[in-house]
Image: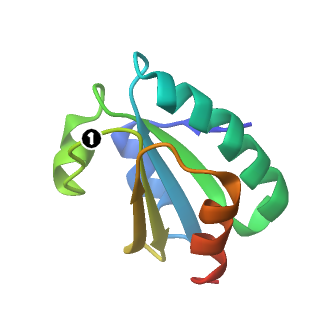
Amino acid sequence: MLKEVSSAEFKETVNDGLVLADFFSTTCGPCKMLSFVLNDVEKEFGEDLKILKVDFDQNKDLTAEYEVTGYPTLILLKEGLEVARMQGLQQKPAIIKMIQEQK
């Protein structure tokens, strides 16, 4: 199950291993479709990857810090450092490829 996090929870979790941050908006259709894709991605990687959902509108500090200008935006972090980014609705194979390149 994908976990929606606050800024504080994000900062506690992001420095540990591989984390995929999904910056989304509750009013965004493509964001809702991406959630289904991310559920499948989560099943594929299991414990090797944490997926955190970050509400774009509720966490303005994080959207500014990571310079997120639109949604959905996926940011892959390894030990707290950004290593890859995708914007817009993505398909599962593209997301998996991005993650595997950083493992």
Locate residue 71, reporting x and y percent. 35, 38
Q: Residue at x 37, y 44 (%)?
A: 8
Instruction: Answer with left or right where residue 50 lies relative to residue 26.
Output: right
Instruction: Answer with left or right where residue 61 lies relative to residue 30.
Output: left
Given the image, on which type of amino acid does mark 1 rest?
Gly
Q: Quadrant of the C terminus?
A: bottom right
Viewer-closest of 50 and 40: 40
Viewer-closest of 90 and 73: 90
Locate residue 96, reporting x and y percent. 68, 66
Q: Residue at x 56, y 26 (%)?
A: 32
Q: Which image quadrant is residue 25 in?
A: top left
Locate residue 68, reporting x and y percent. 24, 49
Viewer-closest of 37 and 59: 37
Q: Quadrant of the N terminus?
A: top right
Instruction: Answer with left or right where residue 97 lies relative to residue 81.
Output: right
Q: Say if residue 62 shows up in the picture.
A: yes
SS at circle 1: loop
Please give the residue where the numbered disc 1 appears in the rendered image. Answer: 70
Q: Which image quadrant is residue 18 in?
A: bottom right
